[in-house]
Amino acid sequence: MIRKGLASDIEPILMVWRAASQQAHHFVPDSFWRGSLDTIQQVYLPSSDNSVFG
């Protein structure tokens, strides 16, 4: 079942985002992705529509 993502899903969604971003943009240093985690977790993911399997 696909459902709307909840606040409790942010951490797993963040891990998927990071892995996908690193794979798609392999030329970007890992330090950039590590430095972006807080902003992605606190700003972008909560303000976007996220769906998860659950």
Image (cartoon, grey):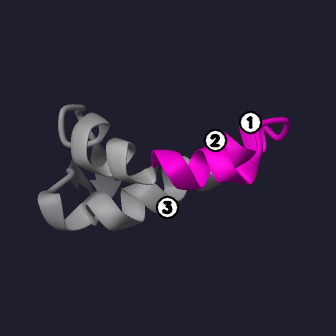
Residue 16 lies in magenta, yes or no? no
Considering the numbered disc 2 on the image, is that residue within a helix, a strand or a loop? helix
Quadrant of the image for the C terminus?
bottom left
Q: Which residue is under mark 2?
A: 21
Say the numbered circle drawn on residue 15. 3
Quadrant of the image for the N terminus?
bottom left
Report, in whole angstroms, how far the alpha carbon at label 1 lies from the one at label 2: 5 Å
Tag 3 near tag 1, CB within 8 Å: no
Three-letter code, disc 2: Ser
Tag 1 near tag 2, CB within 8 Å: yes
Residue 31, above or below 12? above
**Which contiguous range is marked in magenta?**
21-36
Residue at the spot 37% in from the left edge and 43% down from the top edge: 40
Considering the numbered disc 3 on the image, is that residue within a helix, a strand or a loop? helix
Q: Residues within 10 Å of mark 3 (few under 14, many from 20)?
A: few
Residue at the spot 34% in from the left edge and 65% down from the top edge: 11
Three-letter code, disc 3: Met
Kindly report the secondary structure that dominates the magenta region of the rendered protein: helix
**Which numbered disc, 3 or 2, marks the residue that appears first in the sequence?**
3
Q: Which residue is under mark 1?
A: 24
Q: Residue furthest right?
A: 27
Tag 3 near tag 2, CB within 8 Å: no
User: At which x and y percent is residue 24?
Assistant: 74, 36
**Which numbered disc, 3 or 1, marks the residue that appears first in the sequence?**
3
Report, in whole angstroms, how far the alpha carbon at label 3 lies from the one at label 1: 14 Å
Instruction: Give residue 12's quadrant in the image.
Output: bottom left
Q: Return the residue nearer the eye: 20 or 4.
A: 20
User: At which x and y percent is residue 28?
Assistant: 77, 37
Three-letter code, disc 1: Ala
User: At which x and y percent is residue 35?
Assistant: 52, 50
Residue at the spot 21% in from the left edge and 52% down from the top edge: 5
